[in-house]
Image (tube, rainbow, N blue to C red):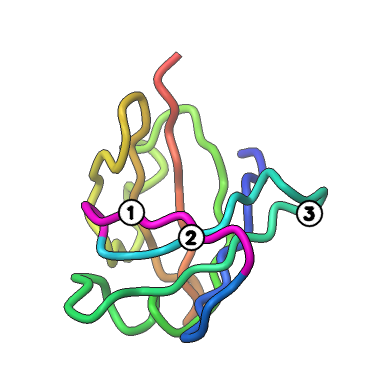
Amino acid sequence: MKFNHVGIPVTGSFDGEIDLPHLKMTVSDHKNNLYGIQWQRYWDGAPYPELVKTVPHVAFEVDDLDAELAGKKVIIQPNSPSEGLRVAFIEVNGAPVELMEYTK
């Protein structure tokens, strides 16, 4: 696993907003800082668990998403938010964790 970013949900505006209408959310670029901090605002009707919309998460890149999900509590099923990327969320000790698999 390799650290990718920390996602912090907020309700207000932030610098560098990037709207993602197909995901019903607004994010910042996690690559614009050394620490991988990404601000996230979820739109009304965004189809995600409250845990993901209200609690910060840590995201890791994995080589095999399906293998990493085996035996875990999956709270967002594997999906492809953009070309060449598959993601899923699991719950670990009450916190959301994002697992990301990039197509090589």
Tags 1 and 2 touching, CB below 8 Å:
yes
- In the displayed structure, does residue 25 sit left or right of residue 99? left
- Image: magenta residue range: 15-23
The amino acid type, in three-letter code, at marker 2 is: Val
Give the label, 1 or 3, closer to the camera: 1
Label drawn at residue 59: none
Q: Position of residue 11 (x, y in %)?
A: 46, 86
| Number of residues whose C-alpha sits closer than 10 Å to that of mark 3, classed few (under 14), some (14–19) or many (20 or more) | few
Label 2: which secondary element: strand
- In the displayed structure, does residue 15 sit left or right of residue 65? right
Q: Residue at x 53, y 78 (%)?
A: 13
Q: Position of residue 47 (x, y in %)?
A: 19, 70
Q: CA distance from mark 1 to mark 2?
A: 8 Å
Q: Nearer the viewer, residue 12 or 30?
A: 12
Residue under pointer 1: 20
Q: Position of residue 70 (x, y in %)?
A: 32, 47
Instruction: Identify whether 89 is placed above or below 104.
Output: below
The amino acid type, in three-letter code, at marker 3 is: Tyr
The amino acid type, in three-letter code, at marker 1 is: Leu
Q: Nearer the viewer, residue 90 or 85?
A: 85
Label 3: which secondary element: loop
Tags 3 and 2 touching, CB below 8 Å:
no
Is residue 31 within the magenta segment?
Answer: no
Q: CA distance from mark 3 to mark 2?
A: 15 Å
